[in-house]
Image (cartoon, rainbow, N blue to C red):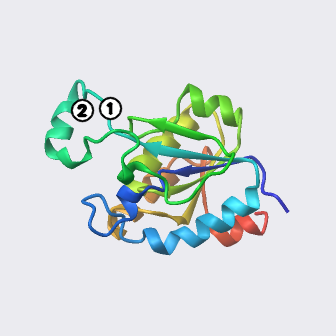
Amino acid sequence: MTPEGWLVVVDLQHVFADEDSPWTAPRFAEVRPRIRQLVDAFGERVVWTRFVAPQRPAGAWQQYYEQFRFALQPPDAPLYQLVEDPGSQPVVVATTFGKWGPELAALVGDGPVTVVGVATDCCVISTVLPAADSGVAVRVVSDACAGSSDDDHDRALRVMSLYAPLVQLATTAEVLAGR
């Protein structure tokens, strides 16, 4: 059974997977097999996203990249590559934490969307809340997201749960069971 709607895989990139990266999501390796299960279940209705640094940071991003100079690399740098080949599935690339915008909205339409990825407390929540605010039903797969820490992951899930019924939390098993 193919789950309803689209799966959005947020920022499954080396910069969050590699243990020596300042932005490592500690449970990245743990959630990756669950994400793969969901990608397989959704078939062709999967969109991947990638965070990349802007060529020239502007506004508050200037101060951000002063703190994280290592990240000022071109979009094709190894750290910004996806850890899996998306094949023919679309990839939305953005210089912002949140990936919800005209490009992603055009791909998924009115949804619903199921969201997985990293980091729960940054790019996931920054994608989920604007999507829900635009009227798209969003389901976040809690055990297929990894935060910058367990506590930050749990706090982000708690915040997103406050947006019910616009945002619903589920587990990988629940999604695969059609719930």
- State whether residue 96 is above or below residue 3: above
Specify the label residue 118 is tagged with.
none
Q: Amino acid at mark 2?
A: Trp
Looking at the image, residue 155 sits to the left or right of residue 8; the answer is left
**Can see residue 46?**
yes
**Can see residue 68?**
no
**Quadrant in the picture for residue 94:** top left
Q: Position of residue 37 (x, y in %)?
A: 67, 68
Specify the label residue 61 is tagged with.
2
Q: Position of residue 84 (x, y in %)?
A: 55, 59
Q: What residue is rendered at 25% in x and 41% in y?
A: 72
- State whether residue 133 is above or below residue 19: above
Specify the label residue 54 is tagged with.
1
**Quadrant in the picture for residue 76:** top left
Mark 2 and mark 1: span between their CA atoms?
Answer: 9 Å
Pointer 2 or 1: first along the chain: 1
